[in-house]
Image (cartoon, helix red, strand yellow):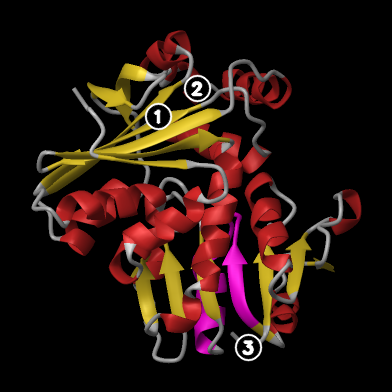
Amino acid sequence: MTGRVLVIGGYGAVGREAATALAGRFAVTVAGRRPERATPVPGATALRLDLGDASALDAALDGTGTVLMCVDRDNARVARACLERGVHYVDVTASHPVVAEIEELGSARATALLSVGLVPGVTNLLARMCADTGADAIDIAVLLGTGERHGAAAVAWTLDAVADIGPSWRARFPAPHGTRTVHRFPFSDQYTLPRTLGVARARTGLCLDSRVLTALLPRARTPLRVPRVRAAVEKVLARVHTGGDGFAVTATGGGRSVAFTGRRQSRATGLAAALAVERLPGLPPGVHHIEQVIDPRGYLAALAGYGFTLHDHYDAG
C-alpha cells in the first residue's frame, strides 16, 4: 500500500487503538482538531485538522494513500474527496444515514470500505457466516459493558439512538453472560445486510452488562428528548463508569449461532479497523461493506489473535 495512513479522529478511544496498531507497519498520521491536548501516539506523526476547512482537508490528503475515519462528522464529504483523488477510505461509523450517503458514491480509482468495527463490522461477518449456511433471517445481539470510557461523540450518538429503540427479544450469549433481553437498536448492520447478503430480514438488539440499565433503555426515550435532561445525562456518563468492560456480539440464523467476545469494545473496534486497512491492497475499487469483500473466518481469526474469542456453533438455547 502506497502513501501514508491518515487517521481522522485518531486521538479518540477507537482511533488511538487503530493508529497504534497501524503505526508499527505503516507511515501513520493522526489528525484531530487539538492534537496538542492529546497524548501522542507512538510511531505516528500529529496533524491539526479541522474538517470544516476544505483547503485543510485537501492539504491533508496530499501524500495520503488511505484515510481511516474514526469520527462522525462530514463523513460523506471526506469520503468523496478521498475517492475523487484515488485515496482509499475506511469508516467505522455505526450510523445508517451516514452509511447510506457514502454508499451513493462510486469509484473506479479507490476502495471505500464500510462496516469495519465491532458493530457494524464483526457483526456483519458473523451474519455472513450464518448466511453462508443458508440463513434467510438473522438475529444479531450486542452486549456492551458500562464500565468502559467513551468519548463525547460516542456518548452523544448512543443517546440519539435511544430515541429509536425498538421491540425487545431474548438472546443467548456465550458464558458467562447467558440469556438476556435485547432491545432493537439502530446500528447500521441490520439495514444493509438484507441487501449485501441477500437475506430476507436482519435485526440488531442491544443490551448492557447491567440488567437494570438495560431495562431502563426503553423508558429513557421520552426524558432524553428534554434538553436539560439530555445534558445532565451526558455529564454523568462522562464522569461515572460503573460495570465491566466486557462485550459479546452474536449472530443467529439458519440453525447456526456464532459469537465474538472479549474486553474493551473500543479496542476491538480500533483493531478491527486496522485489520481492514491492512487488507485494502487486495480489494476491488468501489464502495463495499466488509462482508462483501473480506472472508469472515480468516479475518476474525486474525482479530481473535489480539486476545478475543471467536465462538462457532455455540449453544444459543
> Crowding near pointer 2: few (<14 within 10 Å), some, many (20+)?
some
Q: Are marks 1 and 2 in contact (CB under 8 Å)?
A: yes
Pick whichever of labels 3 and 2 is earlier in the sequence: 3
**Res 251 → quadrant:** top left
Q: Position of residue 56 (x, y in %)?
A: 75, 76
Q: Residue furthest right?
A: 36
Up-down: is 112 above or below 306? below
Image label count: 3
Magenta-drawn segment: 65-84
Pick whichever of labels 1 and 3 is earlier in the sequence: 3
Answer with left or right where residue 38 lies relative to residue 115.
Answer: right
Label 3 amino acid?
Answer: Thr
Q: Nearer the viewer, mark 1 or mark 3?
A: 3
Tell me how far mark 1 sits from mark 2, CA to CA. Answer: 8 Å
Label 2 amino acid?
Answer: Leu
Q: Which mark is residue 2?
A: 3
Pick whichever of labels 1 and 2 is earlier in the sequence: 1
* Residue 77 counted in the magenta span: yes
Answer with left or right where residue 65 lies relative to residue 251.
Answer: right
Up-down: is 200 above or below 255? below
Q: Which mark is residue 163?
A: 1
* Residue found at x 39% / y 85%: 285
